[in-house]
Amino acid sequence: MTKFQFEAKWKEELVVTGPGGCFCLVFSMGCPTVYLPDEHQWTIKGPAWAKDLYSVLKRELQTWCNAHDVELVIDEKSVVF
């Protein structure tokens, strides 16, 4: 059973819904790419309820990206909103 659900939005956002709420990641549509902060930056930028779920999020997001032919980029400069 997955903890996270992913929904692409038209404003180049990927809405991520999990057990404690939701947040958005940048989802570039030109060359379909989702940007996730690295684990250290996640502890700073991620929502409080999801800080301990980085490994689960990364694994489930990679599975979603693979199924939708989307590249996943792990980058310390990625934003979470």
Image (spheres, rainbow, N blue to C red):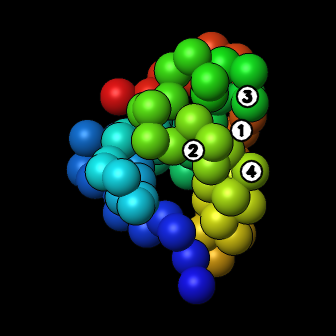
In the rendering, at what x and y percent does residue 27 appear?
Answer: 46, 43
The Cα atoms of the two marked residues, 1 and 4, are separated by 15 Å
The Cα atoms of the two marked residues, 1 and 2, are separated by 6 Å
Q: CB of mark 4 within 8 Å of CB of mark 2?
A: no
Can residue 42 be seen by looking at this rendering?
A: yes
Q: Which mark is residue 1?
A: none
In the rendering, at what x and y percent does residue 3 appear?
Answer: 52, 69
Which of the two discs, 1 and 3, sits closer to the camera? 3
Question: In the rendered image, which residue does mark 3 sit on?
Answer: 38
Instruction: Mark 1 or mark 2: name the one nearer the start of the chain.
Output: 2
Q: Residues within 10 Å of mark 4 (few under 14, many from 20)?
A: few
Quadrant of the image for the N terminus?
A: bottom right
Question: In the rendered image, which residue does mark 4 sit on?
Answer: 55
Question: In the rendered image, which residue does mark 2 sit on?
Answer: 34
**Outermost residue, bottom side:** 1
Which of the two discs, 1 and 4, sits closer to the camera? 4
Amino acid type of disc 3?
Asp
Q: CB of mark 1 within 8 Å of CB of mark 2?
A: yes
In the rendering, at what x and y percent does residue 74 appear?
Answer: 73, 34
> What element does badge 3 sit on?
loop
Amino acid type of disc 4?
Ser
In the image, residue 2 above or below residue 80: below
The Cα atoms of the two marked residues, 2 and 3, are separated by 13 Å
The Cα atoms of the two marked residues, 1 and 3, are separated by 9 Å
Q: Nearer the viewer, residue 39 or 7?
A: 39
Which of the two discs, 4 and 2, sits closer to the camera? 4
Amino acid type of disc 2?
Val
Residue occupying image coordinates x 31% and y 51%: 21
The Cα atoms of the two marked residues, 3 and 4, are separated by 10 Å
